[in-house]
Amino acid sequence: MVLNPVISKLSGKLVVLASASPRRLEILNNAGLRFQVVPSWFKETLDKGLFKAPHEYAVETARQKALEVARRMPFKHLKTPDIVIGADTIVTVDGMILEKPVDKDDAYRMLSSLSGKEHSVFTGVAIVLCHEKENEEVDYQLIDFYEETKVKFADLSENMLWEYINSGEPMDKAGGYGIQALGGMLVEYVHGDFLNVVGFPLNHFCKQLDLIYNSSISSSDQESSTVWLSHNGNHATSNLTQPSSANHTHHIQSSPSASPVHKVKRKSSETELNESSMTLVNSLSKHTGDKDSANTKLPPMTSRGQVKEPEDGEPKKEDLQRICDLLDGFRASKALFTASKMCVFDVLHGRPGGLEAAQVAQEIKASLKGTECLLEACVSLGLLRSKERMYENTDLSTRFLLSDAPFSLRSQILHCNDTVWPIFSHLESGVLEGVSQRDKALSQTSKDQDTLHSSQDSKLRFMNAMHNIAKVTGKAIATAFDLSSFRTACDLGGCTGAMADEFTKAHPGLSVTVFDLPTVVQLREHFQPLHTDNRVSFVAGDFFKDDLPKADLYILARILHDCSDEKLDILLSKIADACTPGCGLLLSEIFLDEDRKGPSRGLLQALGMGEGKQRSATEYSLLLKSHGFITAHVRHTGNLLDAMLCIKA
Ligand SMILES: O=c1[nH]cc([C@@H]2O[C@H](COP(=O)(O)OP(=O)(O)OP(=O)(O)O)[C@@H](O)[C@H]2O)c(=O)[nH]1
């Protein structure tokens, strides 16, 4: 790509850098850009698990940083900028995203995970072009891209690590290092844009400006091809013409059902810019021709930031829908629980063409009316499909709701129905008293049941539920880290051995001992996989009281969140005592976001008021460090559980 002068194109425009990074300020200053700095208030807490690739996380964070400033300025600074620039820099290694360390321990974790390795630095950049309209409304055009640079660290000694950490330099830098300063000592090579590592890919930025201000797309083309971001930043689809420019051919694919983010692939003779995507959403005024955008018509925001309620004063549909979704949530859960318990999905399995409601009613021995309502509700939830009054399973129900599906969750669903649901029926008491309502709820439930389940039956049902979760999450956890340095593992509370199976499958050199209560180990025959791998063995015992089997890796999957502080201390002390330096501890839990604002799955689980608590990765890391385990790697798997690998110091 031939690069043309671009900085001068911005003279006379109000350019805003939505960043508090002194390095970004210096880079753009040195390039001769005149701009104002308005740090963004956007909290960098996007759920990383939602992004398919690390760079998407950096780009979305950059977008939100820039949009927050672009939207705030008209009524906080009483002026609308012409251009707002946002950026976010992250480091990735071993599948982990490293941002700025929260403390020295975190910096140690990051730097030790980078030691001796090549890693990537991604900087996402968002350019928001603001267009103030005659009616004071502001439309935004959002253009974003990312740049990747590879960096290789030398092998770092403990002394080197701690000397660098104690310099204080790591604390405000992605990945815990500053390549432009002391951190340069750690670096063996850089492949790619050095400034991108520092925090701003200046060359790529200039190329992007070139596309915006020097491309041959005529203003009318730009008008027709450039679709504007609605004031609220909500996306909407739009139909687009396919513009072409002198230096670049870019293809903007759009379809009514497509996400509003369209990948724009720009190629040039010299440089293939990596994917830069222009978030294309339609304005409220000009491009709402097609039905989709009409459906997503949003109340316009005045430049003073107030959302204009629709003329008739009706509440916004989206807000009402959000509340109704929450209102109906328990009905949806109960429909799933009931259909599962009544074996609706099993009844429909293997019935080509499906069954009528009357046939299902007969098979599940239920009323026709009740069965029809249940089947229709399941169709509305995507659990069944119907055609000419014939009902069939969907892929979703076939994969997760059949009793004998490889990843069946039916037992977990029955556990939620029979145990969790009664507990949540006493949630108000739980909140008032701050203690679990389990005994009250289950003693009442067991009295209500015609026949009390034998202790073995209820134990089996619980084990089945745990087996379901281990089957669904086991592979993601077992493959989260390189465990080649470990030969023996002990899965504490490993229940049926489903997780142990996945570890032996993923690591041929590893044998796993499942250590669980005698009543659990006695019942393991009910769950043994068809293939019996002799690398999985069972030992009965109580990990709070008995000696732990010797191993060089201990696995704790969904155990710690259920333990009181006292039990945590007992268990972790026993593990620490059983470990020699270099032993591993692999923890698998739901890791809360650092600001404890999500994921709701974890925070809703905490409403069970058990004696344990939900924690973030940092909280778990510090808890384990207090027992001599240093966190080496953290993995947000995007599955139901996350994972952390710690090493005994
Ligand atoms: O080698 C280096 N690597 C990274 C940096 C600096 O690290 C931070 C990255 O953090 P972020 O992208 O979140 O930016 P912030 O500083 O928090 O400012 P925002 O207001 O934009 O969020 C960034 O400052 C890089 O410059 C470095 O200096 N050297």
Image (cartoon, helix red, strand yellow):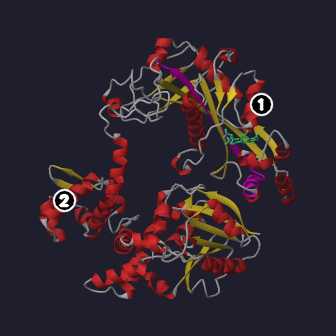
Total labels drawn: 2
Residue bounds of the magenta highlight: 106-133
Amino acid beneath label 2: Cys
Q: Residues within 10 Å of mark 1 (few under 14, many from 20)?
A: few
Query: Which amino acid does the dot numbered 1 rest on?
Result: Glu
Residue 373, numbered circle = 2
Lower position in the chain sequence, tag 2 or tag 1: 1
Mark 2 or mark 1, whichever is nearer to me: 1
Lateral position of residue 522 relative to residue 83, left or right: left
Q: Nearer the viewer, residue 309 or 404?
A: 309
Residue at (71, 28) in percent of width and height = 202
Q: Nearer the viewer, residue 270 or 252?
A: 252
Whether ligand 1 has any atom under 8 Å from the Cβ at mark 2 is answered as no
Q: Residue at x 63, y 29 (%)?
A: 85
Q: Is residue 129 magenta?
A: yes
372 drawn magenta: no
Identify the residue position indicated by label 1 in the image: 26
Q: Relative to 306, does residue 466 appear above or below in the rendering?
A: below
Image quarter in which the C terminus is found: bottom right
- Ligand 1 shows up in the quarter that is top right
Q: Residue 628 location in percent, x, y? A: 74, 71
| Residue 275 in view, yes or no | no
x and y percent of residue 15 in the render? 65, 23
Lateral position of residue 242 relative to residue 69, left or right:
left
Circle 2: is it few (<14), some (14-19), or many (20+) Cα within 10 Å?
Answer: some
User: What residue is rendered at 45% in x and 36% in y?
Assistant: 234
Residue 46's x, y, as percent? 55, 47
